[in-house]
Image (spheres, coloured by chain):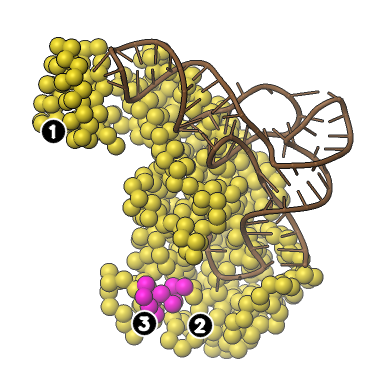
Chain colours: A yellow, B brown
RNA sequence: GGUCCCGUGGUAGAGUGGCUAUACAGAGCUCUGCAAAAGCUUGUACAUCGGUUCGAAUCCGGUCGGGACCUCCA
């Protein structure tokens, strides 16, 4: 099936075809590892996970997916500095070596972050690489040197800056985000850092060393420039090294369109002479929580771990997020997740009811679902189609052959949605005392002793069990 | 100051000119001793004002409200 994706470069939905053979090369701007994943991060990484799953199942493509890890920036430096209150015991003792501290700090949160993504159903095992910025310093330095050599950057006070004015003379700037040069930053607080650049729109490629901060040696034209990379340069260098330019898809949150992605693009053009960095730029919208922007000051800032602590299943959170389109603002609510949990459980019960009689057999494709997903990843419509399909195939009206096909069709959808289980129904372990009460109750019920039967049912409920009566017997289920 | 997006039923969320979205919740029914589960049926909507049109949630304009980016927040 032909896939279509919205491309921020063209501002339109375009048909998607890989640039090279049958392989989709995708780069996702990954996390800065200074804490556990919050639900905004989850939405941002759900997007490439969804893309790669759709590419494989519906597009029939192979995928090489790279998500970087930013392990050097202001926040990680601050967090790993002596006296930081976000330093954890598990990171070990801090040392006089700033780079060693940074490494211990970021490795700790990197592992936590990847775990969080995995529990949310994001297939970290499908990522071909998770390059760390600090491991590509030489590639970045080489790119920076090339940009300087090509006349699009200058050295100033130990730092290197990208010269936007020079670049604009030869290339378009503002391809991913409309920039109004006349009104640039009027009325907006100007970033007042201590670095000296020629123009406020210039951005830093290499930051000169600051006392007590991690740094790497760097020399351009015999000038010593100890320091560390700017933010944008890592993604240019690592995507070039690991995917080659141009690659197929670049993902990130809408906030990254400018300046981060615009500058990445400019760096690639200025340094690599690449006609394009990526064919498609795909950006996810932000989410709000209970109708307000998620922020720590409003008290509605949730990490995945917070939600798990509230008793939520990460897969319910995943399904809740898939319930809105990635390019629209999602209003994340606790009630919403609970509603989705019910819907997910019902489909799971449906699957297990079929699974009692059949094993999945491939062959049936739910066209409506796949057409929706092929149409710019329209998950809300896909889910509506999925529920309609389930409704149109009630368990009681399917023979075993059809049940196997229906299961196969759902399993195929689940390679993308990723929230259901197709193993056999798990056997419920019933404690002996519960079983004994249930037996007594069944005996009372058979004897039409309704009062005793109801009394025992209440006792079972108190023990956390619900009992469902059938014609010839009963079934016990734990109250979840 | 600039650029842009959004406002749909109790809740979340699709829908770009006429036709039930869907899910959860609610109501009724079937089944059941009563339940539970499941199935069936069903109500309530398109911020506001004006315009275009035979017809507008959908197109155009105003107003009100919310949000995003221009600040190394996903």
Report the front residue among B36 and A49.
Answer: B36
Q: CA distance from mark 2 to mark 3?
A: 19 Å
Can you give x and y, in whole percent of width and height, for residue A11 in the image? 71, 50
Of circles 2 and 1, the one toward us is: 1
Q: Residue at x 52, y 64 (%)?
A: A238
Q: Nearer the viewer, mark 2 or mark 3?
A: 3
The quadrant the C terminus of chain A occupies is top left
Judging from the image, what secondary structure is the residue with disc 2 in? Answer: strand
Look at mark 3 in the image and give the residue it sits on.
Answer: A82
Task: Decide if residue A199 is on the left or right side of residue A441.
Answer: right
A115 falls in the magenta region: no
Q: In the displayed structure, does residue A377 sit left or right of residue B17?
A: left
Residue at 43% in and 28% down? A410
Check residue A431 in the rendering and tell me which mark sits there, or answer none: 1
Q: Residue at x 21, y 22 (%)?
A: A454
Classify 10 Å Cα crowding around label 2: few (below 14), some (14-19), many (20 and above).
many
* Sooner in the amino-acid sequence: mark 1 or mark 3: 3
Depicted A339 relative to depicted A299: above or below: above
Residue A131 in which image quadrant: bottom left
Q: Which residues are magenta?
A: A75-86
Q: Is residue B1 above or below residue A41?
A: below
Q: Is label 2 in contact with label 1 (beta carbons under 8 Å)?
A: no
Q: Secondary structure at mark 1?
A: loop
Camera sees residue A137: no
Which residue is identified by label 2? A227
Cα distance in 3D space between marks 1 and 3:
53 Å
Quadrant (top left/top right/bottom left/bottom right) for the N terminus of chain A: top right
Sequence-wise, the earlier of marks 2 and 1 is 2
Q: Quadrant of residue A274?
A: bottom right
Q: Chain of mark 2?
A: A
| Residue name at image x 41 percent, y 74 percent | A79
Report, in whole angstroms, how far the alpha carbon at label 2 lies from the one at label 1: 64 Å
């Amino acid at each position: 099936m032909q896939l279509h994706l919205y491309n921020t470069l063209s501002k339109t939905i375009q048909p998607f075809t890989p640039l090279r053979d049958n392989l989709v090369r995708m780069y996702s701007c990954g996390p800065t590892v200074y804490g556990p994943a919050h639900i905004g991060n989850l939405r941002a990484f759900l997007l490439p996970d969804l893309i790669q799953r759709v590419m494989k199942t519906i597009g029939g493509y192979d995928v090489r997916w790279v998500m970087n890890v930013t392990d050097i920036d202001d926040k990680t430096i601050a967090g790993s500095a002596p006296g930081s209150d976000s330093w954890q015991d598990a990171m070990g003792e801090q040392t006089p070596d700033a780079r060693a501290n940074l490494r211990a700090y970021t490795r700790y949160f990197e592992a936590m972050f990847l775990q969080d993504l995995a529990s949310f159903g994001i297939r970290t095992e499908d990522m071909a690489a998770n390059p760390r910025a600090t491991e590509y310093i030489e590639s970045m330095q080489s790119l920076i040197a090339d940009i300087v050599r090509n006349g699009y950057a200058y050295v100033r006070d130990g730092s290197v800056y990208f010269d936007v004015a020079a670049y604009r003379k030869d290339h378009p700037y503002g391809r991913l985000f409309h920039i109004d040069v006349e009104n640039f930053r009027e009325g907006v607080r100007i970033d007042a850092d201590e670095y000296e650049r020629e123009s406020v729109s210039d951005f830093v490629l290499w930051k000169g060393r600051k006392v007590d901060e991690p740094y790497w040696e760097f020399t351009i034209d015999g000038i010593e420039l100890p320091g560390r990379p700017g933010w944008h340069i890592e993604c240019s260098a690592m995507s070039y090294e690991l995917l080659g330019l141009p690659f197929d898809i670049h993902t990130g949150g809408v906030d990254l369109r400018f300046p981060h992605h615009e500058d990445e693009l400019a760096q690639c053009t200025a340094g690599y002479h690449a006609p394009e960095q990526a064919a498609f730029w795909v950006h996810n919208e932000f989410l709000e929580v209970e109708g307000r922007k998620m922020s720590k000051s409003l008290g509605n800032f949730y990490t995945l771990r917070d939600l798990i602590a509230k008793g939520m299943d990460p897969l319910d959170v995943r399904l809740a997020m898939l319930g809105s389109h990635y390019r629209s603002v999602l209003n994340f609510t606790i009630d919403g997740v609970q509603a989705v949990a019910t819907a997910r459980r019902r489909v799971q019960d449906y699957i297990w009811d079929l699974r009692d009689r059949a094993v999945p057999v491939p062959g049936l494709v739910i066209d409506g679902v796949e057409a929706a997903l092929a149409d710019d990843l329209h998950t809300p419509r896909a889910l509506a189609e999925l529920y309609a399909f389930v409704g149109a195939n009630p368990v009681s009206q399917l023979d075993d052959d059809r049940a196997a096909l229906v299961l196969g069709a759902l399993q195929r959808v689940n390679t993308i949605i990723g929230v259901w289980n197709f193993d056999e129904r798990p056997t419920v372990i019933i404690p002996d005392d519960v079983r004994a009460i249930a037996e007594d109750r069944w005996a009372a019920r058979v004897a039409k002793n309704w009062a005793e039967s109801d009394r025992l049912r209440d006792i079972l409920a108190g023990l956390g069990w619900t009992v469902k009566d059938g014609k010839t017997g009963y079934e016990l289920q734990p109250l979840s």
